[in-house]
Image (tube, rainbow, N blue to C red):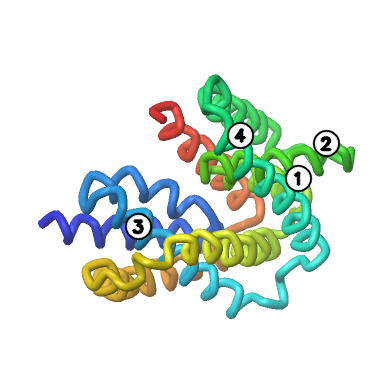
Amino acid sequence: MTEFLYYLVVLGSNIIQGITGFAGTILAMPFAVMLIGIDKSKFILNFLGIAASIWIVAVNHKMVNKKELKHIVIFMGIGLIAGLFLGRITAPGILIKILPVIILIVAVRGLLNINSTKTIENKTILILILLFSGIVHGMFVIGGPFLVIYASQTMKNKGEFRATLSFVWIILNSVILFSNFEKIFIPEYCIQSIISVIPLIIGMYIGNKLHNKMSQKFFMILTFILLILSAVPLFFL
């Protein structure tokens, strides 16, 4: 029964991932941890995140915004290196407590101004958001919501948004996967990862269909709602 519930979680989270290109892993993680344990969850969900992102990029590679992808990889990469260093020499302290508050403020503001065409045009602020996203990801592996904040300001086409973010997840999640390379050889992890591909395929298929039928406005509303939901588990870290 426990494993059945876990596969339902994989199915549901990949419907979300298929629609938006983000939030699937962070929403699935709390439930997966309760059902199959933290170490196995981190490995399998990271693997599935790569698989889901490869699916989206393979089908929508022409939608990838190469200019924004370059900016994200460069500045988030710099922040990631800084975050990995800071994570070794400093305690999380108050930073981990204020992260979800910042996400909630931005997400709620986005919902309230969903009909506004105004965006952050100051390039310095946008670069700082990417740097901060990288730092947070390096320190706590939860920089995704801040990357979504950046993407919501710079990419207004839902397909472009989804494909570009998915390309970023392939890079970031692959780094994490190979940093835990020894776990690839654990039979239990490998078998459950392979079985999990079945609900992933079903979920991605459903999510992709829903994405194609969704208006740009509803897509952005869903994006900000998912940002709010992704912030909730961070209050308990």
Q: Residue furthest front?
A: 89
As shown in the figure, which amino acid type bears the numbered disc 1? Gln
Would residue 206 be found to the left or right of residue 196 on screen? Answer: right
As shown in the figure, which amino acid type bears the numbered disc 3? Gly
Picture coordinates of residue 78, whole percent (x, y)? 74, 49
Picture coordinates of residue 6, whole percent (x, y)? 24, 57
The kind of secondary structure element at disc 1 is helix
Would residue 174 be found to the left or right of residue 34 on screen? Answer: right
Which residue corresponds to the image point at 65% horizontal and 48% vertical from the top-left?
80
Give 105 or 142, whichever is nearer the viewer.
142
Mark 1 and mark 3: Cα distance apart in space: 27 Å
Mark 2 and mark 1: Cα distance apart in space: 11 Å
Which residue corresponds to the image point at 53% horizontal and 66% vertical from the top-left?
174
Give 58 or 182, whichever is nearer the viewer.
182
Question: Which mark sits nearer the N-terminus, 3 or 2?
Answer: 3
Mark 3 and mark 4: Cα distance apart in space: 22 Å
What residue sits right under mark 2 in the picture? 125
What residue sits right under mark 3 in the picture? 12
Picture coordinates of residue 204, whole percent (x, y)? 44, 69
How many residues crowd mark 2 within 10 Å: few (<14), some (14–19), many (20+)? few
Q: Is residue 124 above or below residue 199?
A: above
Callouts 1 and 3 close, C-beta under 8 Å: no
What residue sits right under mark 1 in the picture? 153
What residue sits right under mark 4 in the picture? 107
Q: Is residue 184 above or below residue 41?
A: below
Mark 1 and mark 4: Cα distance apart in space: 12 Å
